[in-house]
Image (cartoon, rainbow, N blue to C red):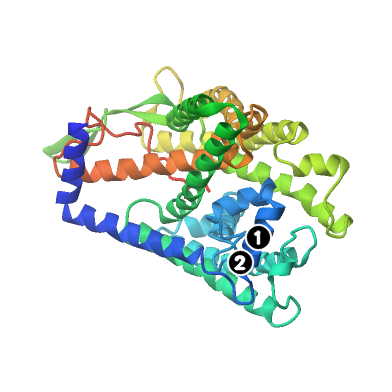
């Protein structure tokens, strides 16, 4: 404890680090305040009553979690940062499969600026479509929230479209400012703050439920211990790597009598057990949104029934099994997209590197691909289990809102962002010859940084 307090004092002593932390906290506070500002034309008191009467579960409840609760509060940040995340995912896939975008990406800093510009334009388009869908959601009988809006057919749809689009762009701007002048990946921090904001109410609700139902505080304490265990396993999954040794041949560089020997260094290629990050879960959950969407069109806004009801419920057995297999499949798919063994083998060969005991070229590519297949299988299974852990938590008697923190995208994002933020703070400390946050003073994430923004 004494060392921890000393570390906090060292953090405060570094002016640049202190300013960055305060700057980040200030922008995060602005984001949180914005989630409580209700759209014009919506009665916040009536809206709160209707939300409590209809509940906030299901897949839309998960979306509400990512938006920091603004989705069901009809806030100006109701769509949150998710349209920007969706646009980033689309652009990331395009740079992997479309030659034109691949060429732009290879142009260095100018190419990166172009990709960012295209991402912003695409964010506007996606936000506009989602804003229209949000107005339709408020109008539908399935939402149960239409009574909180004064006039759904007047100027409300147009004003909502403009305000929600501007709100998402402002949140995107906040994320970029946090990235430039604050601590860590701003977009990831905004999502994490939105998720963590729902944790206190979920804890209070779970504690109240256990104390009133007869389980008592002991059962609640056991649930917290299980949650801690899940977090530790998730940390191990995020940081686990398989290092492939690479030897670089020595060579003589220079002219005349000024020859120097370079190379000969031994390095490692860190292949992460979960190289795809949270992307497989996001893809799987996006597909699981389709049944509820189909039910809304077929049923005319009525609640889905039969198999559609089971698929629309994220805690049902059918939905959990399907989600598990989708996560496993998407893990292989996305890992194959972002890691190219042939490109890695070619780069090593050009730089005079080789894996000891493996011939350069196709043999090296086959060797890397074999290792990648072996580590992706357990990684995909663990990721699939984490994705459906909230279902098992609810079956064990955990409240639905609290069960969401036992796994899925929420837990993975929180763990990865916290690790990344701690690593950045530690790097500032070590650069100035202070002890890091860990006793050893070494980096928290030995296998490389785990930015969510790079994987979301």
Q: Are marks 2 and 1 in contact (CB under 8 Å)?
A: yes
Q: Which mark is residue 264?
A: none
- Residue visible at 16% across and 44% down? 10
Q: Nearer the viewer, residue 110 or 251?
A: 110
- Residue visible at 18% across and 50% down? 12
The CA span between labels 2 and 1 is 6 Å
Residue topped by disc 2: 45
- Residue visible at 64% across and 28% down? 392
Q: Nearer the viewer, residue 333 or 124?
A: 124
In the picture, residue 174 is in which quadrant? bottom left
Q: Sort mark 1 into few (<14), some (14-19) or many (20+) by Cα contacts within 10 Å.
A: few
Q: Is residue 113 visible?
A: no
269 horizontally vs 441: left or right: right
Q: Position of residue 246 (x, y in %)?
A: 37, 27
Q: Sort mark 2 into few (<14), some (14-19) or many (20+) by Cα contacts within 10 Å.
A: few
Q: Position of residue 319 (x, y in %)?
A: 74, 36
- Residue visible at 51% across and 25% down? 226
SS assignment at label 2: helix
Q: Which mark is residue 49?
A: 1
């Amino acid at each position: 404890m004494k060392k921890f307090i000393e570390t906090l004092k060292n953090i405060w002593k570094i002016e640049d680090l202190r300013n960055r932390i305060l700057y980040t906290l200030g922008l995060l506070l602005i984001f949180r305040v914005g989630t409580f500002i209700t759209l014009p034309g919506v009665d916040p008191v009536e809206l709160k009553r209707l939300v409590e009467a209809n509940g906030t579960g299901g897949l839309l409840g998960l979306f509400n979690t990512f938006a920091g609760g603004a989705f069901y509060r009809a806030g100006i940040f109701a769509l949150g940062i998710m349209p920007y995340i969706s646009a980033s995912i689309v652009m990331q896939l395009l740079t992997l499969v479309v030659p034109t975008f691949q060429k732009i990406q290879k142009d260095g800093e100018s190419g990166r600026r172009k990709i960012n510009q295209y991402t912003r334009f695409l964010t506007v388009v996606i936000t506009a479509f989602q804003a229209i869908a949000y107005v339709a959601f408020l109008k539908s009988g399935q939402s149960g929230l239409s009574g909180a809006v004064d006039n759904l057919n007047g100027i409300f749809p147009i004003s909502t479209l403009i305000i929600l689009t501007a709100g998402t762009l402002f949140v995107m701007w906040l994320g970029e400012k946090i990235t430039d002048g604050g601590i860590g990946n701003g977009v990831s921090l905004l999502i994490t703050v939105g998720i963590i904001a729902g944790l206190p109410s979920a804890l209070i609700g779970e504690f109240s439920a256990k104390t009133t139902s007869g389980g008592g505080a002991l059962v609640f304490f056991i649930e917290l211990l299980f949650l801690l265990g899940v977090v530790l396993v998730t940390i191990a999954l995020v940081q686990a790597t398989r290092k492939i040794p690479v030897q670089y041949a020595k060579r003589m560089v220079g002219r005349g009598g000024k020859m120097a020997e370079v190379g000969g260094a031994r390095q490692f290629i860190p292949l992460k057990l979960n190289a795809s990050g949270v992307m497989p879960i996001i893809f799987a959950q996006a597909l699981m949104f389709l049944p509820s969407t189909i039910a809304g069109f077929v049923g005319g806004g009525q609640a889905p029934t039969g198999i559609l009801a089971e698929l629309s419920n994220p805690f049902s057995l059918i939905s959990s099994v399907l989600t598990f297999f989708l996560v496993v499949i998407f893990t292989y798919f996305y890992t194959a997209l972002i890691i190219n063994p042939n490109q890695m083998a070619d780069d090593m060969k050009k730089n005079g590197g080789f894996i000891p005991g493996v011939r350069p070229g196709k043999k090296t590519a086959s060797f890397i691909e074999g290792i990648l297949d072996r580590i992706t299988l357990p990684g995909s299974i663990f990721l699939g289990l984490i994705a459906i852990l909230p279902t098992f938590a609810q079956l064990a008697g955990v409240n639905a809102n609290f069960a969401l923190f036992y796994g899925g995208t929420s837990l993975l994002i929180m763990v990865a962002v916290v690790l990344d933020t701690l690593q950045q703070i530690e790097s500032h400390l070590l650069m100035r010859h202070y002890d890091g946050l860990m006793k050893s003073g070494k980096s928290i994430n030995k296998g490389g940084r785990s930015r969510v923004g790079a994987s979301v």
